[in-house]
Structures are given as C-alpha cells and as structure tokens.
Image (tube, rainbow, N blue to C red):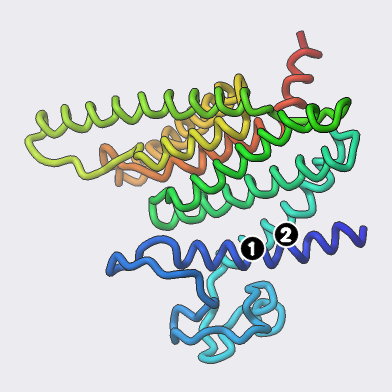
Amino acid sequence: MWLLTLLFAAGLLFGAVLNSLADNLPPDADDVRHAPRRPRCPHCGRSHRPPYWLAVAGLLLQRGRCEHCGSPRRWRPVLVELAAGFVTAYLWVWAGAAVGSLPDLAVRYLAALVLVLSLILVTVIDVEHRLILWVVVWPTALAILAFSALRSLAPLVMPGLEMAGNDLVKSLLGGLAGYGVTLAIFVLAEVYIRVVRVVRGQPLEEVAFGGGDVNLAGLVGLAVGWPGVILSLTIAIVAGGLFSLVFILVQLARRRYTPHSVFPYGPFLVLGALVIYLFGKNLAAIFVAGR
C-alpha cells in the first residue's frame, strides 16, 4: 500500500507537469508559444507560490482560491493531477498482473505510463484548443517504438526472457495501419469540404478531422499494434458516431442545431487506444469464452 501511495503522490507531480504543458504548448491569442513555466493565476497573472504549484494543494490549503487575489482556481488542473495520480498507481497494479520478471514489469509499466500520461495531455489540449500537437505525439511515438524495440531485442540479449506487449514489427504494422486508414479518412473529408464549398458557394470553415488526428491515430497504432489497431479505430468511430447522434438530438430538441457542427475527435481515438491497450486481452478472453 505504501508503494501505491508513493506512486500516487508522484503522479500528482506528473499531473502538475501536464498542466504546465497544456497551458503553454498551444499558441496563445497572439499565436505565441511559451516554454513550460510555473503555474499562474489566470485572473491576476501572478505565479503561484511553490506550496501551491499543485492544484490539489491549492484546493486543500486555500479552498481552491488564488493565494494572491483570492479568485477561484480552475478545476481542470485538479482533475488532471488526480487522474495522473490514479493512473501512475493503477498502472503498477495493471503491469504486475501479466508479467513474470522484473525487467518485463519495468518495461511494461514505463511504456504504459508514458503512453497514458501523453494521451491525457493530448485530450486536454484537443478539448480546450481543438489541436493535436506534433510536439506531443511524435516524442511519444518514438518512446513507444523504443520500448517495442527493447521487447524485440531483450530475448536476444537475455535468452529465455519474454516480455509482454507488442514487438517492433507489430508496432510498426499497427502504426502504418492507423496512419494509413485515418489519412484516407482525412483525404475524403477534404474532398467533402471542397464539394460543400462548391454547392454552398461559400467557404466551409469547420474541419471535423484534421492532420493532428492522423498523427494521433498513427501513435495509437504503434501502441496497440497489429491487429489491435483495427479494433481500437472501430471503438473510436463507434463512440464518435454515438456522441454525434446524441449531440444532434439534443441540439434539435433545443432548436439550436447547426449543420456541420464539429467537436474534437482526439478523445475518441484516445478512448479506443486505452480500451485495447489496457483491456484488449481481457476483452479477447471474454469473446473467446462466449463463443
């Protein structure tokens, strides 16, 4: 229990880093990108003191208010820190349930931690800014490839050692499939936009599926491998479709429906990735047992 508590505390610190990246990596109103910096109050603009860099600490010690001006702090940083804390602790239990050696446990845990924390950051930025930044996706993709290569090379260096997860070949095939399928969807979406522009006689500014989504799908493919990427994308498409249906029905009921309304698609790709990456084998076992 003490180890999980320690990991949860470390996860809170990871969450603070994610919040700083989410606040500073996307361009501001003047299209300026900032290097990660200390958390600051959006109302008075002053940096929080070190004891309150953690939003959770600010919630507990200052009742969620800025120590300088007394304005309420945002809830997103608190939620991200708590999510990162839970993930950091839970993944240790998840990794330990399917491994047989310490090297296998370390690789499985670190690979999952890097992926899930990066996907949290991707989700926050996409929801708030409608952006999926390459500066987040590509370093994560390289890290996942490095872990996959390690799984492939480990048995050669240490005969008899087997590691859970995708090897380099499966990861590369998954990445190519994820990138290729979504790139085709992206091209079709561009064709559709051009057709609508001609029919309507005016520009269609809304973009439902962008290049960032293509990059993210490639990352998802690298993480879940082949053929898991097919199930992952299927989950994303179905979840996105169901959300769209509910969204349209709600807007129609409120008489506020606007054709071609769009929403971030990244969270659905993240959902599909997490379901398959974390629970794919369990789902497969349930499917086989039910046949």
* Residue, disc 1: 15
Label drawn at residue 85: 2
Residue at point 84% right, 63% down? Answer: 6
- In the image, residue 85 sits, relative to residue 224, either above or below, namely below
Residue 290 at x, y percent in the picture: 78, 12
Residue at point 35% right, 46% down? Answer: 254
Q: Nearer the viewer, residue 38 or 261?
A: 38
Work out how far the residue at label 2 is from the one at label 1, CA to CA, in angstroms: 7 Å
The amino acid beneath tag 1 is: Gly
Residue at the outermost bottom position = 68
Residue 247 at x, y percent in the picture: 42, 40
Q: How packed is label 1: few (under 14 Cα within 10 Å), some, or many (20 or more)?
A: many
Residue 150 at x, y percent in the picture: 71, 36
Q: Quadrant of the N terminus?
A: bottom right
**Badge 1 element:** helix
Residue at point 11% right, 34% down? Answer: 200
Q: How packed is label 2: few (under 14 Cα within 10 Å), some, or many (20 or more)?
A: many
Q: Are marks 2 and 1 in contact (CB under 8 Å)?
A: yes
Residue at point 22% right, 27% down? Answer: 191
Precedes in sequence: disc 2 or disc 1: 1
